[in-house]
Amino acid sequence: MRTKHYFIFTAMFFVSISTVSAFADSAIPNWVKQVGEYWITDQIDDDGFVQVIEYLVQQKIITIPNAESPEGESAASIPSWIKTNSEFWVKGDISDDEFAVGLEWLINNGVVRVSIQQEDAATIESPTSEDTTGLSGEVTIGLILPLTGDLATHGIENHEGSKFGVEEFNKHLESIGASWHLKMISEDSATNPVIALEKLSALNAKGIGIVVGPETSSNIRNIKGYSDSNNMLLISCCSSAPALAIPNDSVFRLVPDDRNQGTAIAKLMQHEGIEVLVPVWRGDTWGDGLSRAATDSFTNRGGQVEEGIRYNPESPEFSASASLLAETVRESVEEHGAGKVAVLFLGFAEVLQFMQSASEHDILDDVRWFGPGANTKEHKLIDDPIGLEFSTNIQFTTVQFAASKNPTYEKVQEHLTETLGTDPNTFVHSSYDVVWIIGLAMLETQSADVSLIKEKIPEIAEKYSGAIGPTKLNEAGDLAQADYEVWGIRGAEWIHLGKYTQSDDSVLLN
């Protein structure tokens, strides 16, 4: 049932706007609601929302009949009623046609700049990947990773891992006399959910339905609806949000979901004598999920969790969040003592900017800090003088998904270390194995048909053992089980400190 607020809003709208079109033919895929949710929860700003709507309308992914941008000046900003309307639509309180009224207003008033011809108003279906049964020649897959943005360091490393996987798999195909070879087309998500959707749509338009990536859970969350609806296949090296552990969707992930990582972090902190935890986390799908997993596990172990800081990952600086954190930590230290209090930071490369702000508060380097795999081996922390001093003082300690050491692991590690000039993150091995699992599924089915490959992936993953070791998947299509390595910044460098073993919930430090 629609709320009274909606009817008041509708009446005000029709008084203020002269004429609108009938929207019987409007077409808005249901997954676009994820974009609206990002906007109304401030995970993307007004400019980001406008950019994605422009792209979706221009590409005819959504259809707004009888709308065309005017010449001349644009409207100065998005009216507040548009955001209100979007919230009603995301919640299901108004229909697609009613939501389209607001989109038409944005177009007709020049906020969204597109040109739509009347005869082109019908929805155009995206092409599906070709059935290439009986493979020969060049078989193309896509890759979407953050080569720029907050996770560029890991993205570049993981890109090299997948690239090496293609090279090695093609050597295998040549050795068995296969008449085909893999080619990978790479796209940069810029660690941005809106751009990731644009890149996925572009790959689909080229007939590429099998994609390595994206890397982040927020990106996958924003594009999986499109992938599900267009019979595409995503295989991620690194996404781990529990909210995306969904059986029978279009996403596979060669890493356990973060209920595993949260348990490992909680056990490590308990092992280190921490009794009171103050969490600080990135305000997105990944951060929310990992924060919940870690704090729930810590509480179940008898620990105390203070009210934490959920920060905006798009913020250019973190002085306000650091001040709030300092206040909470000070109160906890006064009550429990510095040795029993810790900060759990869950973020990406912005960890450096956050620690630079935190360094201005003496209390914040009096306690231990812990972090996730996303921060493990983050070289920015030791390359920056402030970051190095602060992370050393807090004995910054992280956990990272542990690959099984084996000859394939060593081969990948050696190649990537030489290529990159630095010790890479563990996810490069998952990135390598993803390519092999895709390739082996194609080899066994002699097809690049998405439906056939999607059906074959679990079987191949159960039999395959690669750079990370066994790759058996669970019913949600995620890696079934894994241990975690413990790393920390000690003596101006990242040092391997020990291991968390999932089977017996134990931590063993060197």
Image (tube, rainbow, N blue to C red):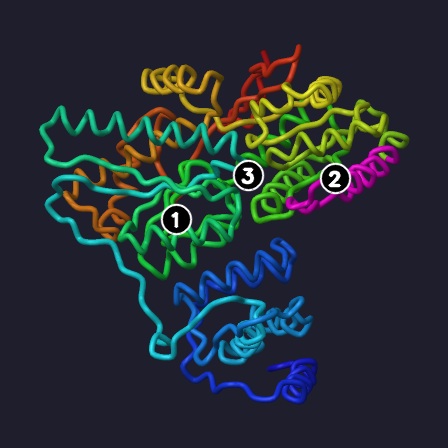
Residue 429 in percent (x, y) is at 39, 27
Circles 3 and 2 in contact, beta carbons < 8 Å: no
Question: Which kind of residue does numbered mark 1 sit on?
Answer: Val
Q: Height in image: 506 above or below 92? A: above
Q: Which residue is mark 1?
A: 251
Q: Nearer the viewer, mark 3 or mark 2?
A: 3
Residue 468 in percent (x, y) is at 38, 26
The N terminus sits in image quarter = bottom right
Indicate which disc, 3 or 2, sits on the residue closer to the N terminus: 3
* Residue 289 counted in the magenta span: no
Indicate which disc, 2 or 1, sits on the residue closer to the N terminus: 1
Question: Which kind of residue does numbered mark 3 sit on?
Answer: Gly
Q: Which residue is mark 2?
A: 318
Position of residue 426 in the picture relative to residue 390 (left or right): left
Looking at this view, is 30 or 304 the one in front? Answer: 30
Looking at this view, is 12 or 32 the one in front? Answer: 12
Q: Nearer the viewer, mark 1 or mark 3?
A: 3
Residues shaded magenta: 306-331
Residue 325 in percent (x, y) is at 80, 38
Q: Which residue is mark 3?
A: 149
Query: Within 10 Å of the Cα at label 3, are there few (<14), some (14-19), or many (20+) other Cα atoms?
Result: some
Position of residue 449 in the picture relative to residue 34 (left or right): left
Residue 406 in percent (x, y) is at 35, 17
Query: Within 10 Å of the Cα at label 2, are there few (<14), some (14-19), or many (20+) other Cα atoms?
Result: some
Question: Which kind of residue does numbered mark 2 sit on?
Answer: Phe
